[in-house]
Image (cartoon, coloured by chain):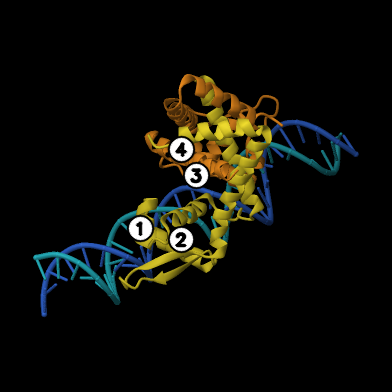
Chain colours: A orange, B yellow, C blue, D cyan
DNA sequence: AAATATAGTTAGTTTATACTAACTAATATA
DNA sequence: TATATTAGTTAGTATAAACTAACTATATTT
């Protein structure tokens, strides 16, 4: 059990460091942690409006509005007015905004590669099977 | 290979969410990402001075000095003047500052528990073996 | 001993990140 | 239809997080 905790800790560090490295690769060092979190959440929520984004981030609407305005200014986001409710607008990631996801995909792929480099086909299949089990609901 | 990348992505999310949850548990929500990063780095570097901390964080000394002053004010850190070089002081985490590490330990343990809950003894040993191989140097 | 370098600090500035209070415009409810 | 609510905005404020330039005190080099 002790050894498992150690491994989890190492995995955690590996993910953190890989993300940092990927951030440099993708020239996203200028983005703060907070800004990354905004873009990740917008991606996760799939074109939320400001109210939804604020709720998800547990921040007030004015706070989120100011942040969103800056992202629009810097061409990471754009707004599309809603047809159903003309008060509301959906937030979309621009190509530049989507870089964050590409960055995530990139370092996930790199970690996956480093895993498969260390194991043979059979071991890899076993690992995938066990991790799937471990990550399954309930 | 595709499935492995998917698993890595899920692991990454699991770690992120577990850390967020642990942060609430330990009443560290008042700390920003940046502040967490400072404390983690100070812990990692083992009582660095301001110059070393600034170099590691890739920030200027005045920036780090201001941040450190606030941590001292809030009783997360204290300084000990160096004997060898009287210009320099080492940064130490207080008990409160060490909460961050305890928080890390806590969520690593929780993840490890959730893993072991899903597998029997034999599977768990196999998983630990494979992950150790995967996390080994070279 | 004088000149140079280093650790840390101070002051001043900019931008990011958060808040509350009060507002407009559109939608939903009584 | 008058009233409530909701989505978003504006204004004003406070603190965090970063910088450069210039300084003090100590250590190192010439």
Question: For this rendering, which residue is in front, A24 or B122?
Answer: B122
State the image coordinates of residue A86 (x, y, percent, origin top left): 67, 30
Identify the residue under disc 4.
Answer: A19
Identify the residue under disc 3.
Answer: A33
Q: Is residue A48 visible?
A: no
Q: Return the chain for callout 2.
A: B
Looking at the image, residue A26 lies above or below residue B24:
above
* CA separation in Å, label 4 and label 3: 11 Å
State the image coordinates of residue D21 (x, y, percent, origin top left): 28, 61
Q: Residues at marks 4 and 3, common chain?
A: yes
Q: Return the chain for callout 1.
A: B
Label 1 environment density (alpha carbons within 10 Å; few <14, some 14–19, many ≥20): some
State the image coordinates of residue B1 (x, y, percent, origin top left): 49, 20
Question: For this rendering, which residue is in front, A30 or B99?
Answer: B99
Q: Element type at marker 2?
A: helix
Query: Residue placed at 37% from the left, 56% from the top?
Result: B54
Q: Nearer the viewer, mark 2 or mark 1?
A: 1
Label 2 environment density (alpha carbons within 10 Å; few <14, some 14–19, many ≥20): some
Looking at the image, residue D17 lies above or below residue A28:
below
Q: Nearer the viewer, mark 4 or mark 3?
A: 4
């Amino acid at each position: 059990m002790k050894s498992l905790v150690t491994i989890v800790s190492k995995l955690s560090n590996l993910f953190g460091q890989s993300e940092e490295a990927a951030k440099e690769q993708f020239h996203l060092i200028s983005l703060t942690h907070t800004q990354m979190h905004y873009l990740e959440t917008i991606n996760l929520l799939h074109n939320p409006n400001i109210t939804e984004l604020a709720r998800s981030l547990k921040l007030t609407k004015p706070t989120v509005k100011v942040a969103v305005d800056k992202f629009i200014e810097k061409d990471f986001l754009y707004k599309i007015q809603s047809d159903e409710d003309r008060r509301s607008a959906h937030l979309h990631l621009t190509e530049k905004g989507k870089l964050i996801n590409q960055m995530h995909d990139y370092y996930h792929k790199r970690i996956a590669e480093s895993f498969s480099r260390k194991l043979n086909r059979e071991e890899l299949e076993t690992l995938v099977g066990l991790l799937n089990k471990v990550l399954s609901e309930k």
